[in-house]
């Protein structure tokens, strides 16, 4: 795929550590938009962006771990990342950690904690992202 102007602008910013550029580039690799689809590159860029502490990036990486997309499925790692993003008031992550806690997938089942996260997600305006 031919690199467009947006991609040419994203590459240097991502290399310089811009979390938003890393995320945008990761999404392009994930879906093959303007570049060849490359799940491994997408996960690597998303992990770098998530390591910078931004909740939406942590949530996105957690989703890949939960679904096993581009890496081995790992619900414990997904739960850890969802908790980090949820603690930053990210409604979608609050909802997702609630689901994992309610089901006991990747974490010990805890209905009280699940209820708490669902309530926080609801209060944040999450209607199932």
Image: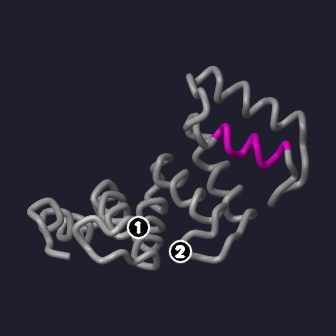
Quadrant of the rendered structure where residue 105 is? bottom right
**Residue 56 x/y as whole percent:** 47, 47
Residue at 39% x, 70% y: name it.
45
120 relative to 77, above or below: above
The magenta region covers 94-102
Give the quadrant of the N terminus: bottom left
User: Can you identify the residue that label 2 sits on?
Assistant: 70
**Residue 14 x/y as whole percent:** 26, 67
Residue at 30% x, 64% y: name it.
25
As drawn, is 86 to the left or to the right of 54?
right
Q: Do the residues labelled 2 and 1 touch (CB within 8 Å)?
A: yes
Disc 1 crowd, CA 10 A, few/some/many (<14, 14-19, 20+): many
52 relative to 127, above or below: below
As drawn, is 107 to the left or to the right of 3?
right
Quadrant of the rendered structure where residue 110 is? top right
Mark 1 secondary-structure assignment? helix
**Residue 103 x/y as whole percent:** 86, 48
User: Can you identify the residue that label 1 sits on?
Assistant: 30
Q: Earlier in the sequence, mark 2 or mark 1?
A: 1
How was the colour assigned to the protein in this rendering? Answer: one colour
Residue at 78% x, 30% y: name it.
116
Q: From mark 2 to mark 1, how far is it between C-alphas?
A: 8 Å
């Amino acid at each position: 795929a031919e690199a467009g102007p947006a991609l040419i602008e994203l590459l240097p910013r991502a290399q310089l550590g811009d979390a938003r550029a890393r995320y945008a580039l990761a999404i392009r690799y994930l879906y093959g938009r303007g570049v060849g689809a490359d799940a491994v590159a997408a996960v690597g860029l998303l992990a770098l962006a998530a390591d910078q502490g931004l909740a939406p990036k942590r949530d996105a990486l957690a989703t890949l771990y939960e679904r096993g997309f581009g890496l081995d499925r790992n619900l414990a790692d997904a739960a850890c990342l969802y908790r980090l993003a949820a603690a930053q008031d990210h409604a979608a992550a609050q909802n997702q950690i609630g689901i994992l806690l309610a089901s006991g997938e990747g974490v010990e089942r805890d209905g009280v904690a699940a209820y708490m996260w669902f309530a926080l997600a609801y209060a944040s305006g999450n209607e199932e992202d």
